[in-house]
Image (cartoon, coloured by chain):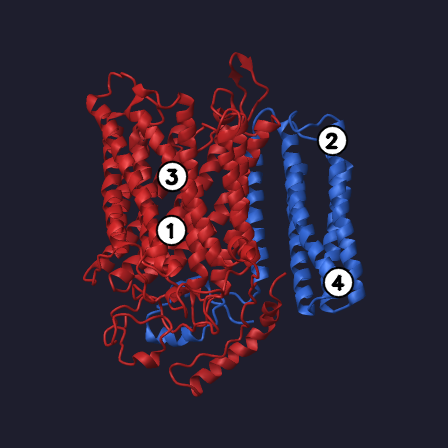
Chain colours: A red, B blue
């Protein structure tokens, strides 16, 4: 079971901490740190190829496994979106059956939100970066961490298996609202929806195992001197997102379990009395609205489960590539924590058109606008970090800048939709599609790309190809605006979302139809650019330019390992000792423009930080 | 115990200042003065609490609708509740004997708690059987469905606990352990068992009074 050394320390900590504080004042110089009172973590050492690369307990490998699985699933989601766009642009070709269109909408949404972005940010970047950034040898419970990945893979397989069952995957929309999700007539209402619900339950179970690891590692196994407030903001973002996930995913689990029972056993948790195809069904008295509350009590925090790690990562990228400390570090931490707490009080803004008392809507409109305040603070702080910074237009910086613009754009339309009166007419139009793709599709993906360009040398020891990267950036950035800007306009003229074809409706203008073709062509080009990116990953991992150690001249611990890429146990013989926060860039008086976290004060005596 | 700082105090630190750096350099990298495993158990209990709370919210919401028919409480449920209370009590005793390093008592205690836990689960299954033979199926009324759901989830949590109980017991019987390790493991299991008793009392009380 647990590392027993840990337990004995519980009792001993008292005496040693006291001794430390006494000696620090009297004996040593400014570099003094008390002796390490916590014994080193006992690591699992693999002996075979299988346990090294497949059933690995090393968080770095698990992170890469997570990332590959998530990106692979995401590619399927991307192909689904291509098919939908082709259908919308050229309805005459009959590319998709109506039922297939709904199934693709559903699977695209679920895959992108949960199986790509959540898994990539928390499972991928979390596993890769948390132990390295905190200065730990590995996660707190490596075995559990390994199980977490395999359970996630199982969830993906169950999800994808629903493409091959009779009736195909569910076409209920990613929100899976009952009663239609499990009523005949909805595509995949027999086998597809069951597999979807089971897959989600499995995902939640696997995620809970992983999430336990992320937060306990960050809380309990940091390096000496690494206080919580010295952690890079990436860690803060992932930490808060994990806490959100641990509290929000249960709502999804509860909803999924009860919906499964309604479907398989015929209970009436969510299913009201209804007549289907002329026959009265055996259901009675269930409350579909209850499911919506449960779903969105999960669903809204889910937005921030994706956004908060992105916020954290982007803060670090901007700071490193503008060679400037992050503006308002404490404010950034407060904003992350504040957004996390507030995100549990805004869920019903997804349900304005479900029917609710006006006061309820008023309350949720207010909380929704309040959550814009800490979010706006973060945007201001990013801009102020750039202000008079030594901006390096590297690929990570380009993606960061693109993120800020895109996030502001999507956030502003969010303020529109957060108000009940504006939301009601817009809610079933392409305006909403444009809004959430900008704010939680494109914006986090730009962060993912920036982060991959930034940390690729840490994983492979090589740089990604710069030229291909620039083509990828410009096509992705401009292309995604070509896709989603016109959708705002389509929304305003009233083009309904979720329709697989709009036929010759009188209010649909010719420009709308032309825009549909334009959007589809842009989507195909942007998608193709992602294949270029994948080629770059494979090509550069094998033949890319060798990276020097700490290629971006960053301060945080992940770059300060004895070898790059870091080996098993991350930090060689001795764990690092931390003397400063991760943002000492361009400190007045210092020789170089960065001071890594492990540099003791005696080596940079001339550096002076202004008193605030 | 090391003095722990409150969350607001931590959040108001200015890590870039020289005076704060002197304090921070002495930090040993742990936030709480407890073991990782204990924090893990607490986290799991928090997540379980959220799950059960949401079910209770769903229950309270669904109860208001006209088709709700209350279900009889078989007397066996009272017996099962008593078994679970005893189970928790005996686990507390095992913890005490583990702290005193009383090997014989630990062994007997571990067997007892395992036996009681399995008896509880079997008792719950018998309650299910009784109810079904009386015609109270999950489909026939939503109150029944909630009963089956609650007992099943609680039972699954107990099975999860029994998995760790099995690991501790087999480790203990093989004799290949460090004392502090076993003491800690037993303590954590005991905490989890008390938690499950608490959950059961809440769920049982809820079903009893509605």
From the image, tell me which residue sits under label 1. Answer: A308
Is there a contact, CB below 8 Å, between mark 1 and mark 4? no
Cα–Cα span, label 3 and label 1: 21 Å
Percent from the top left, x then y, of residue A289? 48, 30
Q: Residue furthest top?
A: A278
The N terminus of chain A lies in quadrant = bottom right
Cα–Cα span, label 1 and label 4: 47 Å
Label 1: how many Cα within 10 Å (few below 14, some 14–19, many 20+): many
Position of residue B4 relative to residue A269, above or below, is: below
Q: Which element is circle 2 on?
A: helix
Percent from the top left, x then y, of residue A108? 40, 35
Cα–Cα span, label 2 and label 3: 43 Å
From the image, tell me which residue sits under label 3. Answer: A364
Label 2: how many Cα within 10 Å (few below 14, some 14–19, many 20+): some
Is there a contact, CB below 8 Å, between mark 4 and mark 2? no
Q: Indicate the chain on which mark 3 is placed.
A: A
Is there a contact, CB below 8 Å, between mark 2 and mark 3? no
Would you identify the image quadrant in which residue B53 lies?
Answer: top right
Give the label on residue B174, or none: 4
Cα–Cα span, label 1 and label 2: 48 Å
Q: Indicate the chain on which mark 2 is placed.
A: B
Q: Nearer the viewer, mark 2 or mark 3?
A: 2
Disc with the residue nearer the chain's start (4 vs 2): 2
Cα–Cα span, label 3 and label 4: 58 Å
A237, B62: nearer the viewer = A237
Percent from the top left, x then y, of residue B77? 74, 40
From the image, tell me which residue sits under label 2. Answer: B131
A172, A461: nearer the viewer = A461
Q: Indicate the chain on which mark 1 is placed.
A: A
């Amino acid at each position: 079971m647990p590392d027993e050394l840990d337990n004995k320390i519980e009792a001993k900590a008292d005496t040693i901490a006291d001794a430390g504080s006494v000696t620090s004042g009297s004996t040593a110089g400014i570099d003094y740190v008390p002796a390490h009172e916590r014994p080193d973590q006992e690591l699992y050492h693999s002996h075979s190829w299988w346990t090294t690369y497949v059933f690995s307990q090393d968080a770095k490998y698990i992170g890469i496994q997570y990332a590959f699985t998530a990106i692979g699933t995401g590619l399927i989601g991307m192909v689904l979106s291509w098919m939908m766009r082709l259908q919308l642009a050229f309805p005459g070709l009959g590319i998709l059956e109506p039922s297939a269109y709904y199934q693709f909408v559903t699977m695209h949404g679920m895959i992108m939100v949960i199986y790509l972005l959540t898994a990539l940010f928390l499972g991928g970047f979390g596993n890769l970066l948390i132990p390295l950034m905190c200065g730990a040898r590995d996660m707190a419970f490596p075995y559990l961490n390994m199980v977490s990945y395999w359970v996630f893979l199982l969830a993906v397989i169950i999800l994808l298996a629903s493409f091959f069952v009779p009736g195909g995957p569910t076409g209920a929309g990613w929100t899976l609202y009952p009663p239609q999700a499990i009523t005949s007539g909805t595509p995949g209402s027999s086998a597809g929806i069951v597999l979807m619900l089971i897959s989600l339950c499995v995902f939640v179970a696997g995620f809970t195992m992983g999430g336990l690891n992320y937060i306990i590692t960050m809380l309990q196994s940091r390096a000496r001197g690494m206080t919580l407030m010295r952690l890079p903001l990436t860690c803060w973002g992932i930490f808060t997102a994990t806490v959100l996930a641990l509290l929000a995913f249960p709502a999804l689990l509860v909803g999924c379990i009860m919906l499964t029972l309604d479907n398989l056993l015929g209970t009436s948790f969510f299913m009201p009395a209804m007549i289907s195809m002329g026959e009265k069904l055996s259901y009675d008295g269930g409350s579909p609205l209850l499911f919506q509350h449960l779903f969105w009590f999960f669903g809204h925090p889910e937005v921030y489960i994706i956004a908060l790690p992105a916020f954290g990562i982007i803060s670090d990228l901007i700071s490193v590539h503008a060679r400037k400390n992050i503006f308002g570090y404490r404010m950034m931490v407060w904003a992350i924590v504040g957004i996390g707490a507030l995100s549990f009080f805004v869920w019903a803004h997804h349900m304005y058109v479900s029917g609710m008392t006006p006061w309820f809507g008023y309350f949720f409109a207010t909380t929704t606008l309040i959550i814009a305040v800490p979010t706006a603070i973060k945007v201001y702080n990013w801009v102020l970090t750039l202000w008079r910074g030594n901006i390096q237009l590297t690929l990570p910086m380009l993606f960061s800048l693109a993120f800020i613009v895109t996030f502001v754009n999507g956030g502003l339309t969010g303020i529109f939709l957060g108000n009940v009166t504006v939301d009601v007419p817009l809610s079933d139009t392409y305006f909403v599609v444009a809004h959430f793709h900008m704010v939680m599709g494109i914006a986090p993906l730009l962060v993912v790309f920036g982060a991959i360009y930034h940390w690729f040398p840490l994983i492979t020891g090589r740089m990604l190809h710069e030229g291909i990267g620039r083509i990828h950036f410009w096509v992705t950035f401009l292309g995604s605006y070509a896709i989603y800007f016109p959708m705002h306009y389509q929304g305003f003229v009233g083009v309904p979302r979720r329709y697989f074809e709009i036929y010759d409706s009188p209010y649909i203008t010719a420009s709308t139809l032309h825009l549909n073709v334009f959007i589809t062509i842009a989507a195909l080009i942007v998608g193709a650019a992602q294949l270029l990116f994948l080629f770059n990953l494979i090509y550069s991992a094998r033949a890319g330019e060798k990276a020097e150690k700490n290629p971006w001249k960053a301060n945080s611990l992940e770059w300060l390992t004895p070898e790059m890429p870091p080996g098993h146990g991350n930090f060689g013989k001795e764990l690092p000792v931390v003397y400063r926060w991760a943002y000492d860039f361009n400190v007045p008086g210092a020789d170089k423009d960065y001071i890594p976290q492990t540099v003791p004060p005696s080596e940079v005596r001339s550096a002076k930080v202004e008193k605030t | 115990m090391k003095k722990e700082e409150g969350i607001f105090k931590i959040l108001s630190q200015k890590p870039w200042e020289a005076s704060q750096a002197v304090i921070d350099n002495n930090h040993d990298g742990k936030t709480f003065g407890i073991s990782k495993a204990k924090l893990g158990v607490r986290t799991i209990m928090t997540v379980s609490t959220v799950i059960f709370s949401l079910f209770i919210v769903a229950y309270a919401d669904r109860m208001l609708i006209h088709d709700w028919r209350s279900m009889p409480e078989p007397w066996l449920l009272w017996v099962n509740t008593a078994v679970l209370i005893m189970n928790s009590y005996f686990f507390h005793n095992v913890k005490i004997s583990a702290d005193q390093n009383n090997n014989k008592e630990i062994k007997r205690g571990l067997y007892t708690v395992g036996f009681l836990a399995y008896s509880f689960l079997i008792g719950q299954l018998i309650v299910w059987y009784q109810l079904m033979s009386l015609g109270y199926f999950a489909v026939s009324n939503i109150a029944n469905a909630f009963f089956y759901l609650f007992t099943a989830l609680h039972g699954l949590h107990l099975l999860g606990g029994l998995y760790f109980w099995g690991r501790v017991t087999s480790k203990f019987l093989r004799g290949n352990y460090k004392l502090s390790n076993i003491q800690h493991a037993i303590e954590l299991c005991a905490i989890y068992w008390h938690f499950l008793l608490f959950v059961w009392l809440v769920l049982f009380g809820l079903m009893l009074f509605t």
